Image: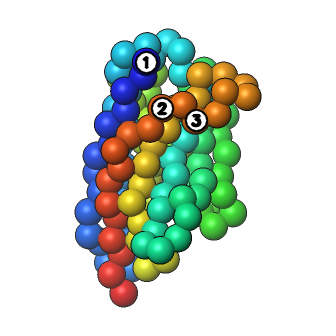
Amino acid sequence: QVQLVESGGGLVQTGGSLRLSCAASGRTFDIWTMGWFRQAPGKEREYVASVRWSGGTTYYADSVKGRFTISRDNARNTGYLEMNSLKPEDTAVYYCAASTGPGTGWGFWGQGTRVTVSS
């Protein structure tokens, strides 16, 4: 089992920045990829970005490419999502998730942290 706890959400003005953290515990050595997802009010959850736990290769949704940066600190078992140039449409609950291998899906999820971008 992998436990994930997000932090760092809050209220920010358009154009501002926030840094989300996702602290992993438990069988962290099983993590293959850590990802961030978000769910805006009335919308489905959508993929934001992901990072390979070993090697650090990153992937982004087109909507955040160039504005968000995903990273991880293996020594701290923590993933990060640096969000810059925030827009009102980035308002959502942000979730981190972990996958333990190709084809296994996102088997572990955090409880989410709310990000609100005011216009």
Query: What residue lies at 55% left-to-right and 41% top-to-bottom?
Result: 35
Query: What residue lies at 59% left-to-right and 49% top-to-bottom?
Result: 49
Let me know if residue 15 appears in the view. Answer: no
Residue 58: quarter of image? top right
Q: Residues within 10 Å of mark 2 (few under 14, many from 20)?
A: some
Is 17 left or right of 87, judged from the image as shown? left
- Element assignment for label 3: loop
Badge 3 vs badge 2, beta-carbon distance below 8 Å = yes
Give residue 50's position: percent from left, percent from top.
59, 42
Circle 2 residue? 108
**Front-most of residues 84 and 26:** 26
Circle 3 residue? 106
Q: CA distance from mark 3 to mark 1?
A: 12 Å
Amino acid type assigned to the residue bearing label 1 in the image? Gln
Quadrant for the N terminus, please. top left
Residue 1: numbered disc: 1
Give residue 114's position: percent from left, percent from top.
32, 60
Looking at the image, is mark 3 or mark 1 earlier in the sequence? 1
Residue farthest toward the bottom in the current orientation of the protein:
119
Query: What residue lies at 30% left-to-right and 57% top-to-bottom?
Result: 9
Residue 86: quarter of image? bottom left
Is 119 left or right of 59, judged from the image as shown? left
Badge 1 vs badge 2, beta-carbon distance below 8 Å = yes
Quadrant for the C terminus, please. bottom left
Q: Residues within 10 Å of mark 3 (few under 14, many from 20)?
A: some
Q: Residues within 10 Å of mark 1 (few under 14, many from 20)?
A: few
Give residue 2's position: percent from left, percent from top.
42, 22
